[in-house]
Amino acid sequence: MLYTGGDADRVQVQNIAFAKNPADPLLREWVKPAYNPVIPHPADVLFNQFRDPSTAWVGSDGMWRILVAAQVGSNNTGIASTLVYRSKDFRHWERNASPLYTSRAAGMVECPDLFPVAEPGMEEGRLHYAAGTASGAVRHV
């Protein structure tokens, strides 16, 4: 599981944890490896605006991908962004050069995710993007 962690100064990073007992249906205990964070805080992102890693998925190239909400730039001129990261091993992550989504109108993207939605008559779902903003607006792309 990927999750957002922070230090005493509220600098946000992305960490990983593994179920101590994957057979436990409630997954009550987790182990945090010493190599956290798996995604350090990017230099171009506001210190406390780098959070909410999405559910991971594997692309057609075999690479894992996740989305992370961020505010790129400074507090007064930041751009709400959905950053895309990819990994071969779920431990070493690389940021894509271009974000999936940006907006100067929103202060911050919250909880971005991608998921397939099947329409009547379709065998496979089309991929949809959903994210909320602090103002309560939701954007579908």
Image (cartoon, helix red, strand yellow):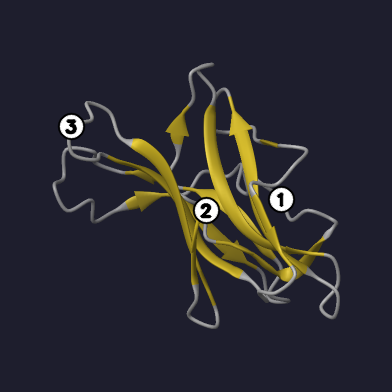
Residue corresponding to mark 2? 53
Residue farthest along the top direction in this orientation: 61
**Label 2 CA crowd tier, 10 Å (few <14, some 14–19, many 20+):** many
Please give left or right for residue 73 compared with residue 115 in the image. Answer: right
Q: Position of residue 91 (x, y in %)?
A: 57, 33
Q: Quadrant of residue 8?
A: bottom right
What's the mark number on residue 121?
Answer: 3
Number of marks present in the image shown: 3
Foreground residue among 10 and 75:
75
Would residue 119 be found to the left or right of residue 106 on screen? Answer: left
Identified at 64% across, 32% down, the residue is: 92
Residue type at mark 3 is Gly
Furthest residue to the left? 25
**Percent x, y of residue 125:** 30, 35
Q: Decide which of 34, 91 is in the foreground and name it.
A: 91
Q: Earlier in the sequence, mark 3 or mark 1?
A: 1
Q: Which residue is mark 1?
A: 40
Local packing at callout 3 (Cα closer than 10 Å; few below 14, some 14-19, many 20+) is few
**Vertical side of 17 occupied by 51: above or below:** below
Q: Earlier in the sequence, mark 3 or mark 2?
A: 2
Relative to 127, 40 lies left or right = right
- Residue occupying the point 80% across, 70% down: 78
Q: Residue at x 70, y 74 (%)?
A: 105
Instruction: Give above or below for 20 relative to 106.
Output: above
Spatial separation of the CA atoms under disc 2 and disc 1: 13 Å
Q: Secondary structure at mark 3?
A: loop
